[in-house]
Amino acid sequence: MDEKPTPEKDRMQDIVSMAKRRGYIFPSSEIYGGLNAVFDYGPLGVELKNNVKRAWWDAMTRMRDDVVGLDASILMARRVWQASGHEEVFTDPLVDCKSCKGRFRADHVIEQLGSLDVCPNCGARGTLTEPRPFNLMFKTYMGPVEEDADLIYLRPETAQGIYVNFLNTQTAMRKRLPFGIAQIGKAFRNEISPGNFTYRMREFEQMEMQFFIPPEQEERWFNYWKEQRRQWYLDLGMTPTRLAWHEHTKEELAHYARAAVDIYYEFPFGSREIEGIHDRTDWDLRRHTEYSGKDMSYYDDLEKRRYIPYIIETSVGADRSTLAFLCDAYDEEEVNGETRVVLRLSHRLAPVKVAVMPLSRKENLVALAHKVHDSVRTLGLTQYDDTGGNIGKRYRRQDEIGTPYCVTVDFESLEDNAVTIRERDSMEQRRVPIADLRAILAEDLAK
Ligand code: ATP
């Protein structure tokens, strides 16, 4: 508590240790030494990530008439990944170090050191092999026999589940183009060099939306979705100056894309991609038509023409954006000569909305505090904290997990039927009647 705020460069370490200490994110299988690049969300982490997913789902489906939801399976026919090109080209260039046996992504080494002359791990010269393609898809087998014929993949992206359901969805929902299909779900990639906490994981969740359009509207919708997606982060309180655009050059473009732009976030470890917006043209539905033999074209009965829809995709990692929100919210400030850690999460994202605490453990105070707590439970996840001890310490604990409001029940409350609301960011306190508490908090939390 009495240390000076940490400089930016060590910030990531602080966030990782806070995330573990306070029940946000744990390493997977930790008692067995952990599993590289796989993480578990603790009680507060699951709430935060669910809030991020809910905010995305609301913005992308419920608040719009032109996007519907879907939940496709993780396991899909192998032909899907042949049609999509993943079996052939979903690879990263892999180099091995003959000296330390380390394995690296060639493009990352070049980015870091300018060439492949030196091993980024042991520093040996001329020990890196020629880059070779390494397929990132996890393999598994369907049925009791492990034969090539039964080989399937854990999906490396959720998008394909949407494409193969385009006709089902469009017909069932009687949708006219342009319209979109949104989905949240797990994806798996056997990343060569994972790292930076939950930034690059081997099992992660994606939030993807595919918007089906007439070919000539490509540019218009690409620009439209760029703006919409940037605004989503701002609406959830992200610092505008930490967001940036990164336009893909011809060399960077994926095999399916005509144009792509990434939204970058300024993490403590550097400015990195959190979301991609891609113009995929008619590539996906054309390929699925070809490989499945099913006609995936759309007939526009108003314009009396048939065509294969173009697709604008928005794709963001639920874990990666959650990490960005966590980093963005993390703050340390000096208050009365002490360092206060405060997670300035927006009200919508904060896992715990309200914490109720009696000033002491005296029976009559505890009984009233329980009643007060019950009256605010429906505002979202709330906590009751009578761990005793100094109220300032209890406020600090709530600050550190991002709780917007603390409500204190003190001895005066027994007389005046009022309690104190203490706000996280300003630390301001105000006295309100218990009878009005829920309505006041509901109004403030909606801000
Ligand atoms: P990168 O260049 O970082 O490997 P990518 O360009 O391959 O990412 P996409 O295939 O466009 O990523 O995936 C869309 C989004 O899914 C990314 O912007 C990111 O938020 C998320 N994502 C992709 N791979 C991972 C991963 N290994 N761990 C966590 N999130 C990921």
Image: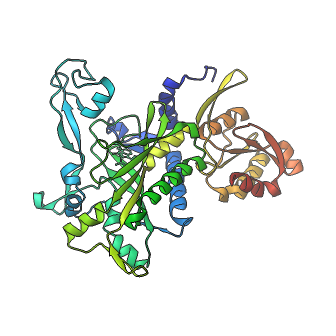
Q: Residue furthest right?
A: 415
| Left or right: residue 247 compared with residue 105 | right
Residue at image point 43% right, 79% down: 174
Please provide percent x and percent y for residue 408. Answer: 76, 43
Residue at image point 24% right, 74% down: 294
| Left or right: residue 115 compared with residue 40 | left
Please provide percent x and percent y for residue 210. Answer: 40, 61
Residue at image point 47% right, 28% down: 13
Residue 73, above or below 268: below
Q: Is residue 71 visible?
A: no
Q: Is residue 443 visible?
A: yes
Please provide percent x and percent y for residue 77. Answer: 22, 64
**In front here: 266 or 46?**
266
| Left or right: residue 208 compared with residue 446 | left
Q: Residue furthest top?
A: 124
**In front here: 397 or 178?**
178
Q: Quadrant of residue 2?
A: top right
Locate the N terminus by quadrant: top right
Please name the colour scheme applied to the rendered image: rainbow
Residue 120, above or below 71: above
Residue at image point 41% right, 60% down: 218
Please provide percent x and percent y for residue 3. Answer: 61, 20
**In front here: 410 or 407?**
407
